[in-house]
Image (tube, rainbow, N blue to C red):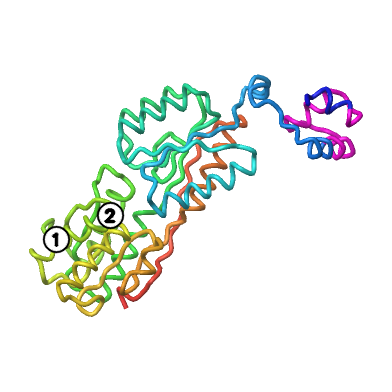
Amino acid sequence: MNIDEIAKMAGVSRTTVSRYLNGGYVAEEKKERIGKIIKKTGYRPSAQAQTLRTKRTKQIGVILPKINSDSISEMVEGISTVLSAEGYFLLLANTENDENTELKYIDIFSRNKVDGIILIGTVITQKHRKAFSELGVPFVVAAQRVDGISCVYYDDYGAAYALTELLLEKSDCIGYIGVREDDKAAGLSRKNGFLDALKAHGKKFDASYGEISLFNIQSGYEQATELFSRHPEIDGLFCATDHIAAGAMLYLRGAGRRVPEDVRVVGVGDGKISRVTSPTLTSAHLYYNECGRKAASILLEHIGGETPVQEIRLGYQVVERESTE
């Protein structure tokens, strides 16, 4: 079965069938006839031929820092919802938070002629900026703000500030477990929000009341162990992610410290884990699915020829649960 046979069966020209297959204008009556024939015959156009005609592959490269993450999966779901509706397919690349692997996939996707790239960013380096400047396809960064680049990101600063103020209502001595600060969103912005909230309430932060963790429960447990061994007087704990907070609460339970009676704890992200910890975790809800949707929508605009850089900052919502009550 080929396009000429489809045209003959539908009683239309070959050009009309071609326009139908490529999303061009076709009168409703002819469109209905062609659609019925294609459905009846199971005809599928050659992807290679369509690529040659339209100069598009209908494929989008999505680069992930890690695959076993609730926030990442929600973002990818949002990206997929928007792009699938427009007939695009996703090619997923998992970098395991390795900068060189990330740069490698940017290069691979660019050379293999995907129609666009979405990078779910963590650490953006000068090497990244150089790679962005050399890209020959449209691209968008999600979850990080990058000057001069179309991006969708969260109000990490505002979320951290609001959570710290919540701790300050009932806690006198507050500790901090963050992540590496070259991650501008989860590391630097959240720490700055935490510090500025303390400053606004006339409190200075001693660096010995802070620790830097990896993005997992085990590391949260380990850093809480270090922190509370130095400062058992801490009665409020800000954690840069929900998983770090979950690890810290495991430590506190084992150490005989009650949450929230002895130590109030907050996290950031409002992931699934915040609802299953014991006690449940107060957190700031970040709109991961919406981030993916907006990143995909901006990318489609760039693919369609819209070139202005767009920066979209999403809000947050503090969700108070048992860990601070």
Q: Is residue 66 above or below residue 274?
A: above
Q: Name the residue at 52% across, 24% down.
A: 113
Q: Kindly report the distance in space between the C-alpha atoms of the residues bearing marks 1 and 2.
A: 20 Å
Q: Identify the magenta region.
A: 9-34
Q: Which mark is residue 131?
A: none
Q: Nearer the viewer, residue 51 or 120?
A: 51
Q: Name the residue at 23% across, 57% down.
A: 218
**Which structural element holds mark 1?**
helix
Left or right of 61? Residue 164 is left
Q: Name the residue at 64% across, 40% down.
A: 86
Query: Residue 11: which quarter of the image?
Result: top right
Query: Residue 98: which quarter of the image?
Result: top left
Residue at the farthest left position: 230
* Amino acid type, mark 2: Asn
Magenta stretch contains residue 19: yes
Quadrant of the snapshot with the C terminus: bottom left
Q: Earlier in the sequence, mark 1 or mark 2?
A: 1
Q: Nearer the viewer, residue 130 or 223?
A: 223
Q: Which mark is residue 216?
A: 2
Q: Which residue is labeled 1 in the image?
A: 209
Q: Is the stretch drawn in magenta largely helix, strand or loop?
A: helix
* Amino acid type, mark 1: Tyr
**Which structural element holds mark 2?**
loop
Q: Is residue 242 above or below residue 320?
A: above
Magenta stretch contains residue 41: no
Q: Percent position (x, y) of residue 198? A: 23, 63
User: Counting other residues with Cα less than 10 Å from the Cα at mark 1, is it few (<14), some (14-19), or many (20 or more)?
Assistant: some
